[in-house]
Amino acid sequence: MGRRWSREDEGQAQEEEEVVMGMFDTVNVPCPTCQTVAGFQSKSGDCLLMEYTLEEAPSDVLTDVNRHGPVTCEKCGTRYSVKLTVTTVVVVWTSEDEDDT
């Protein structure tokens, strides 16, 4: 929490607590039964309040996509979550002279 100062009518400063909300990204995931879309929040990745479809979401965002899951579809009542599987991992060899960026 942050702090801020405000003035009351009498002109005296009074300390107040300021609620600071966390940043996240949203991945829109269709219900497997009726295709109604639900927003899954992720706190991994850059967390810039971006919104993605399941197909276009970056892999780092998808690693935390089930943080509030499973969800229940508001339309049909189906409970579902996202199953993330890694199909390909590539290891790249670099020389010691190359920059790490």
Image (cartoon, rainbow, N blue to C red):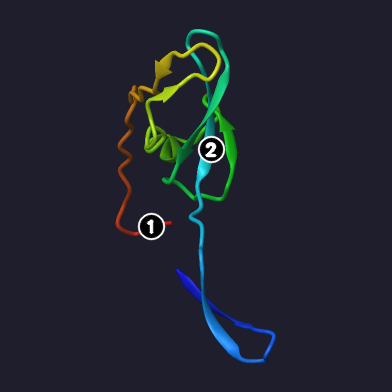
- Which residue is identified by label 2? 26
Q: Quadrant of the N terminus?
A: bottom left
Q: Residue furthest front?
A: 10
In the displayed structure, 39 sits above or below 83; it is: below
Question: Which element carries disc 2, helix, strand or loop?
Answer: strand
Looking at the image, which residue sits at the far top? 33
Residue beneath the point at 40% across and 17% down: 79
Tell how many labels. 2
Seen from the viewer's position, the closer of residues 78 and 85 is 78
- Which one is closest to the eye, mark 2 or mark 1? 2
Residue 96 location, quadrant: bottom left
Question: What is the C-alpha distance between the residues marked 2 and 1?
Answer: 30 Å
Residue at screen point 57% across, 33% down: 52
Q: Earlier in the sequence, mark 2 or mark 1?
A: 2
* Dot 1 amino acid type: Asp
24 vs 52, nearest the viewer: 24
Going by the numbered disc 2, the residue's amino acid type is Thr
What x and y, as percent, mark residue 37?
Answer: 57, 21
The residue singled out by tag 1 in the image is 100
Task: Decide: few, some or many residues near mark 1? Use Cα within 10 Å; few <14, some 14-19, many ≥20.
Answer: few
Is residue 70 toward the left or the right of residue 38 in the image?
left
* Residue 26 percent location from the top left of the image: 53, 37
Q: Residues within 10 Å of mark 2 (few under 14, many from 20)?
A: many
Q: Nearer the viewer, residue 25 or 8?
A: 8
- Residue at x 44% of width, y 13% of height: 78
Above or below 67: residue 34: above
The percent coordinates of residue 72 (x first, y second) are 44, 21
Query: What is the residue that sits farthest to the bottom in this orientation?
Result: 11
In the image, 7: left or right of 83?
right
Instruction: Give the SS element for disc 1.
Output: loop
Q: Residue at x 51, y 63 (%)?
A: 20
